Image (tube, rainbow, N blue to C red):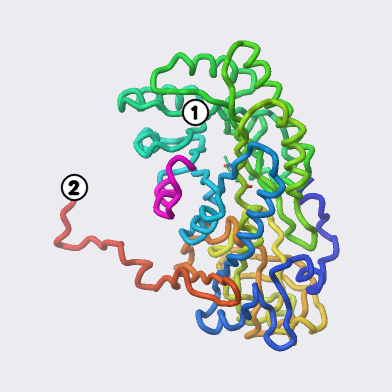
């Protein structure tokens, strides 16, 4: 099981244990918390808080580790852009040899803008519009992951009208419970995703008869933050059975897109092992002569980012610690009850006696809570804290709720840092808003 494996009253890991579990973090006795050799206090001082910090080395190391684990398999990594779509992040993964898994026109355009070849892009999503499918065909991307008969028909009409053939895989719904949070499980029959397992072979046979379409395989993606191998084993076994059955019917099936979902350790645990995941792929598909694609997002980029915040004040003898980051910046705790480790940045604060606090933001909602009843060294007003493992589903999900401008982003690389997105100005917040007046033309 995923996050439910931790009971609400499990003790929180110590600051030392949290840092020891993260090879790119170090507590320096003078400079405080360092991310890949850069004192985080220096970035906060220069750019203010809240501020996101991404580590290039962490992204590179994780992609390399994943590729090593996949060694010997005919498998390609397509980074799930939705986890973190900053152009600089996309460029790092592209340079590391990953393609992209996109879910919208905007992500497709971002991936192309970052220099990712169309031939290295796959397009997932349950509701692609005709305009999006037209763009995919025009760009000549590698594959469209089809999620419904209606989408298949639309793509066939579009591609054949354009005189093109688009390779497709059918995303099947294996009806497997990934054992993760209800809002991020995607592979159960009652989820909106994919084609019912029992319908897949017939629809695939139908696809072979359609103009503008070349069916090459199947796809599945059962959810996110999956920490055990059992759901993968069950889902991939069903996928392999389906491929065998389709081949017995004389259908050509050469590709299995295995999706993403590999979980990370948000506490002091190691998260899911890429070796274990690759082992399941090897056991299930190793002898089948299929090309494999995987679409990890969180595993590659989650631990590579953190959110720095300052303590604004404490209340009720430290029962509440109010910081200047909020749910509009990082919504995962509010939306998924997600656990994010929080550590003080100052070496002195890190040694303070531990007390139990709610770490909350200033937004006018009780849900604006980063941690409830968290054991943490006592931090007071002005202290810097780092909210860890915020590289995935962090900045991409942020909003300007409460008229809070988007936080800046810094990137650290080889002991140096640079700003890769400035703080949004307050003026930018209303720059495109029109207030009707006497001169307004109403339609
Ligand atoms: C979100 C998503 C992914 C990535 O999921 P992670 O949990 O970040 O690895 C991969 N494939 C599809 C189709 C997705 O929707």
Residue at the extreme top of the image, as rendered:
249
- Element under disc 2: loop
Q: Nearer the viewer, residue 148 or 430?
A: 148
Which residue is under mark 2?
443
Per the rendering, the mark at residue 371 is none
Image spot of residue 65 (x, y percent)? 69, 54
How many neighbours does mark 1 have within 10 angstroms: few (below 14), some (14-19), or many (20 or more)?
many
Q: Which residue is drawn at 47% across and 23% down?
A: 214
Q: In this view, does 179 lie to the left or right of 35?
A: right
- Which quadrant contains ligand 1? top right
Q: Magenta stretch mostly in which secondary structure?
A: helix
Quarter holding the N terminus is: top right
Is 423 above or below relative to 296? below
How many neighbours does mark 2 have within 10 angstroms: few (below 14), some (14-19), or many (20 or more)?
few
Q: Which residue is drawn at 67% across and 66% down?
A: 388
Is 171 above or below relative to 293? above
Image spot of residue 41 (x, y percent)? 61, 82
Which residue is under mark 1?
168
* Disc 2 from disc 1: Cα separation: 43 Å
Specify whether tag 1 is near ligand 1 (CB below 8 Å): no
The magenta-colored residue range is: 106-120
Image spot of residue 76 (x, y percent)? 59, 41
Q: Nearer the viewer, residue 403 or 92?
A: 92
- Element under disc 1: strand
């Amino acid at each position: 099981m995923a996050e439910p494996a931790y009971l609400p009253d499990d003790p929180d890991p110590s600051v030392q244990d949290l840092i020891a579990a993260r090879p790119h973090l170090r507590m320096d006795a003078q400079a405080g918390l360092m991310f890949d050799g850069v004192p985080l206090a220096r970035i906060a001082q220069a750019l203010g808080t809240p501020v996101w910090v991404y580590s290039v080395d962490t992204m590179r190391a994780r992609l390399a580790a994943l590729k090593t684990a996949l060694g010997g398999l005919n498998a390609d990594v397509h980074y799930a852009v939705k986890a973190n779509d900053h152009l600089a992040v996309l460029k790092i993964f592209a340079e590391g040899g990953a393609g992209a898994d996109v879910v919208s026109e905007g992500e497709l355009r971002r991936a192309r803008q970052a220099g990712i070849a169309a031939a290295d892009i796959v397009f997932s999503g349950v509701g692609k519009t005709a305009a999006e499918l037209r763009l995919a065909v025009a760009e000549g991307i590698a594959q469209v992951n089809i999620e419904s008969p209606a989408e298949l028909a639309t793509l066939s009409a579009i591609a054949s009208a354009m005189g093109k053939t688009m390779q497709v895989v059918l995303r099947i719904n294996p009806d497997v419970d990934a054992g993760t949070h209800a809002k991020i499980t995607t592979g159960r029959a009652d989820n909106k995703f994919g084609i019912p397992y029992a319908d897949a072979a017939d629809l695939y046979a139908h696809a072979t008869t359609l103009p503008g379409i070349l069916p090459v395989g199947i796809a599945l993606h059962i959810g996110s933050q999956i920490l055990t191998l059992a759901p993968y084993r069950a889902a991939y076994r069903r996928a392999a059975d389906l491929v065998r059955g389709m081949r017995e019917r004389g259908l050509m099936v050469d590709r299995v897109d295995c999706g993403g979902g590999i979980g990370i350790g948000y506490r002091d645990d190691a998260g899911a092992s890429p070796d274990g995941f690759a082992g399941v792929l090897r056991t299930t598909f190793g002898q089948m002569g299929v090309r494999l694609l995987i679409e990890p997002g969180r595993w590659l980029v989650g631990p590579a980012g953190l959110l720095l915040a300052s303590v604004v004040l404490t209340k009720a003898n430290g029962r509440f610690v109010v910081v200047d980051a909020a749910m509009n910046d990082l919504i995962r705790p509010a939306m998924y009850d997600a656990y994010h480790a929080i550590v003080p940045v100052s070496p002195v604060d890190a040694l303070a006696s531990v007390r139990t606090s709610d770490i909350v933001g200033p937004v006018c909602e009780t849900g604006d809570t980063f941690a409830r009843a968290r054991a943490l060294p006592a931090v007071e007003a002005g202290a810097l804290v780092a909210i860890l493992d915020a590289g995935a589903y962090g900045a991409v999900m942020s909003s300007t709720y409460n008229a809070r401008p988007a936080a800046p982003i810094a990137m650290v690389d080889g002991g140096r840092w640079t700003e890769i997105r400035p703080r949004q100005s307050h003026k930018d917040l209303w720059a495109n808003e029109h207030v009707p007046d006497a001169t307004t033309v109403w339609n």
